[in-house]
Image: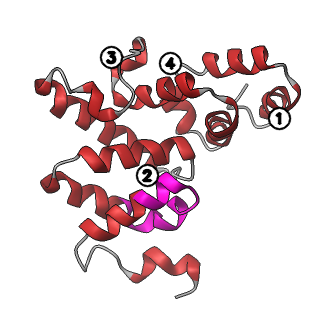
Amino acid sequence: MCVSKYSHFCVLRMFKYGSPTIKSKIVDSFMGNVIRLAGHNISSKILDHAYHTVANTKQRIYLRQEFYGELYRQSKDDDVKTLADTFKDAIDMKLSILSAVKSNIDHLANKQLVDNSLVHAVILEYLTVCEDDKIEETVSAFAPLIPLMLTTKDGTQAAIICFYKSTPTGFTAPAFQRFGK
């Protein structure tokens, strides 16, 4: 229902008027499909609303874990609260987990669907643990999307990291045409 042009209003009404149990069950039903929902124009707004206002702390952690790769999409881990926790015990998994996160956020960046607080949190986590040699291509991909990222605290911190780590040619005038020069 979240991806339908008309029935997504029903989901929003359930979030507005439903009991806390119903709201929690709706957020739990998103598990396993977060990447797909975040990559859809209509459902990304519902996912943002669910992450920002409805989900409890544990559900927020589980929603972020789906960006960390197929392993965390299938099963959730209570010990993993951030991206750095995923490879804390198994350092050999760092490269594969970071590449999975990068491919997921690049997919959303290509669709220009980064105006979501869940996506901002994942981008910030990725930028803080990414190596300096890999960060340049990520920063250049997000340069035109910086105005969309300035709506949340995590997005603003990610934008600051993008400014700090970028080269002078990384940010051009077309990236900020929405602000009128």
Q: Quadrant of the N terminus?
A: top right
The alpha-carbon separation of the residues under discs 3 and 1 comes to: 32 Å
Above or below 146: residue 82: above
- What residue do we see at 61% from left, 17% from top? 28
The alpha-carbon separation of the residues under discs 4 and 1 comes to: 22 Å
Q: Is residue 133 left or right of residue 39?
A: left
Classify mark 4: helix, strand or loop.
loop
153 in magenta: yes
The residue wearing badge 3 is: 71
Residue 118 picture location, percent across and down: 52, 41
The residue stretch that appears in magenta = 142-157
Residue 100 picture location, percent across and down: 29, 33
Type of amino acid at the residue the image marks with label 1: Phe
In front here: 115 or 57?
Answer: 57
The residue wearing badge 2 is: 109
The residue wearing badge 4 is: 32
- What residue do we see at 33% from left, 70% from top? 163
Classify mark 2: helix, strand or loop.
helix
- What residue do we see at 32% from left, 44% from top? 126
Q: Which mark is residue 77?
A: none
Q: Answer with mark 4 or mark 1, whichever residue precedes in sequence.
A: 1
Q: Nearer the viewer, mark 3 or mark 1?
A: 3
Above or below 90: residue 16: below
Examine the image and state in which quarter residue 19 appears.
top right
In front here: 40 or 152?
Answer: 152
Give the dominant element type of the magenta stretch: helix, strand or loop: helix
Type of amino acid at the residue the image marks with label 3: Leu
Q: Answer with mark 1 or mark 2, whichever residue precedes in sequence.
A: 1
